[in-house]
Image: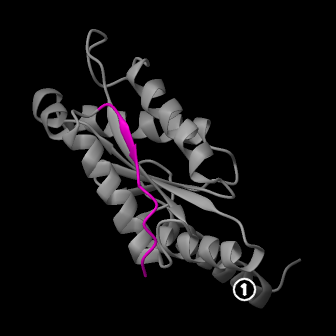
Amino acid sequence: EKSLYKRALEKLAAEREYFEQISRVDGLTGLYNHRFFHELLNAEIARSDRYKYNFSLIMIDIDDFKAINDNYGHQAGDTILRELASMFKSFARKTDPVVRYGGEEFSIILSQTAKEHGRIFADRIVNGVATSKVKGIPPSETLTISAGLAGYPDDASSRETLIKRADESLYKAKSLGKNTFCVCEDQKTT
């Protein structure tokens, strides 16, 4: 029979684990959240610096998401967010963290993946979403995403600059008409 003290310790440990989990994971999609993303990215930069490998960061935005929410409701929007979260996880390797960055924006850290290979991945997810039937919208409609890709250390030497470069590439893709991706030109700055 367990002592009262031991049961109390086990309960505290379980509660701590639960709170750690919810502080890292987005409740709607089950993906890592924005706050934990920064920890993951810092760790990837440290490994990259230590072991001298490149990696890629992809920022993804759902095209015309506001119109989807306006036309079909927020429940449909939530369904789409969950569907895409699942789709992105299926495209990514287990070692590549998939993050709900915020709202309708996602991010994927492609560990040990130079930009040339990151480009192949970005093309695959943009086309994969555009050719999939996604729950939440009528089957006759197509859901699309735009994505931006930047590489470390080619395009940046800090977390902030890497995010900025990937974001700039994402907005370039949006400006080109959406349903595409853009890759940051090599432009290492601090």
Query: What stretch of residues is rendered in magenta?
Result: 179-190
Relative vertical location of residue 167 with respect to residue 92 in this rendering, above or below: below
Relative vertical location of residue 112 with respect to residue 119 in this rendering, above or below: below
**Residue in the picture at 19% in, 42% down:** 175
Give coordinates of residue 41: x percent, y percent.
Answer: 54, 70
Give coordinates of residue 94: x percent, y percent.
Answer: 69, 49
What secondary structure prevails in the magenta region?
loop
Which image quarter: residue 64? top left
Q: Nearer the viewer, residue 77 or 19?
A: 77
Q: Secondary structure at mark 1?
A: helix
Which image quarter: residue 101? bottom left
Relative vertical location of residue 65 with respect to residue 169 in this rendering, above or below: above
The answer to whether residue 187 is magenta is yes
**Residue in the picture at 46% in, 61% down:** 186
The answer to whether residue 172 is magenta is no
The quadrant in which the N terminus is found is: bottom right
The quadrant in which the C terminus is found is: bottom left
Q: Residue furthest top?
A: 140
Residue type at numbered disc 1: Leu
Q: Nearer the viewer, residue 57 or 169?
A: 169
**Residue 120 shown left or right of residue 33 in the figure:** right
Which image quarter: residue 80? top left
Asked whether residue 27 appears in the rendered view, the answer is yes
Q: Residue furthest right?
A: 1
**Residue at numbered disc 1:** 9
